[in-house]
Amino acid sequence: MATISSRLTPTREILTTPSVARLLSASLVGRLPTGMAALAILLSVRAHDGSYTLAGALSAIYAASAAVGGPLLGRLIDRTRQPPTLIISGLISAAAFIGLAAVDPTTTPVTAMGLAAAAGAATPQLEPCLRVLWSPVLRDEHAVRVAYSLDAATQELIFVVGPLVVLATSALADPGIGLVTAGVLGITGSLWFATAAPARQWRGAPTTAHWAGPLRSVSLVRLLTALLFVGATIGAFTVGITAYAEHSAAPAAAGWLIAANAVGALAGGIAYTMLSAAGDEHRRLQLLLCALGLGYAPLVIQLEIPAMAVLAILSGLALPPVLACSFALIGQLAPEGTITEAHAWMITAFGAGNAAGSALAGFAADTVSSRLALAASVAMATVALVVAAPSFVRPKPRTKQHAQ
């Protein structure tokens, strides 16, 4: 017990470091709309007797716009400051969410699509902003690695708490209130984060203008490609486990199995904070990607639901460590002055992979079986490992006059 307590000491020290609790909490609150949007849009559309097709289209537009807008906002932050961009984008996104709640998407679908696009494209880049602040806020490299892991673990809460907030608010009032709540939470978190001292003091490093930004780093692009397949692993799991639950005549179990996976991820992220910083992050990433694939493999057997719940927990353990290790590598591989945009590209890659994995698993479940859909998650993790197998080119020493 004493050993566990001593290993948790760095986490306790980080959480008690000035500004850390505020930054982490504000980021989680401001990012809740990401976990709320799909369900809030669905409930709002159905409340107007709209089709699932329309709801799916609006959700897809929101997600696609967020994927495109994220790197653009990240580049703007790198070249200016965090607070103005976070506050302005937060206000735009909040206004779009509230506007989407006010319109009837069945009679004004084009307007609804425009509002969904605006809400997504203006999503405040709290996640990348948080990660670039860890180094100046914390005392040493090991503390930063612990913070990365804690960050990766707690973001699971967004996709557990977000839908619950939507269901709770919709039960108390009109279904459209879920969209309003998403907008209010987004701007609240953004203001809380942007007014913190570290966010106000941060300045981007000088960089050489280049249209590709951080994507001019070949090694970074390869890392992002690997993360795209990591996202596909999670997307395939979500669809595959839902199909399994339906084929087991227990469709309600899907939500519990997905929640079990999130619990495993939270536990894995917290456990990862107890490990020392890796001397070779690339080597550790390879091992973690291998663990990711092995974690999802037993689900293909498709046991009874209680056993599948245990396996779902185990399958979630490796994801936060994979992400935390990737955060550290992005910090090493991103060219000077592009770190916020690089982290935004990571979110885009993961989200695109998640969507692609969901589509692939959906096709597999419809045409063959839920077993094949779950096997797709293992296959995607394997591809991620193959992509990340060759050593990443280590960045050259940087100077103030030259940006790699």
Image (tube, rainbow, N blue to C red):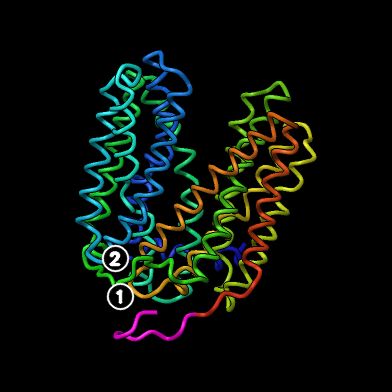
Task: Give the image location of residue 5, x and y in percent.
Answer: 55, 63
- Mark 2 nearby-residue class (10 Å; few <14, some 14–19, many ≥20): many
Residue 322's image quarter?
bottom right
- Mark 1 nearby-residue class (10 Å; few <14, some 14–19, many ≥20): some
* Residue in the picture at 35% in, 63% down: 340
Residue 90's image quarter?
top left
Specify the amino acid type for callout 1. Thr
Specify the amino acid type for callout 2. Asp
Q: Is residue 53 left or right of residue 200?
A: right
Indicate the secondary structure of the residue bearing disc 1: loop
Q: Is residue 373 left or right of residue 214?
A: right
Image position of 233 with respect to 404: above or below: above
Image position of 369 with respect to 69: above or below: above
Image position of 286 with respect to 72: above or below: below
Q: What type of secondary structure mainly makes up the magenta span?
A: loop
Residue 225 tag number: none
Which quadrant is the C terminus positioned in? bottom left
Q: Is residue 401 magenta?
A: yes
| Nearer to the camera, 81 or 348 | 348
Task: Give the image location of residue 131, x and y in percent.
Answer: 39, 62
* Residue in the picture at 60% in, 32% down: 256
Query: Is the C-beta separation of discs 1 and 2 under 8 Å?
Result: yes
Which quadrant is the N terminus positioned in? bottom right
Q: CA distance from mark 1 to mark 2?
A: 9 Å
Residue range (magenta) = 395-404
Task: Give the image location of residue 18, x and y in percent.
Answer: 31, 64
Q: Is residue 342 left or right of residue 359?
A: left
- Tell which circle, 1 or 2, labels the residue nearer the N-terminal end: 2
**Residue annotated with mark 1:** 207
**Residue annotated with mark 2:** 78
Q: Is residue 241 magenta?
A: no
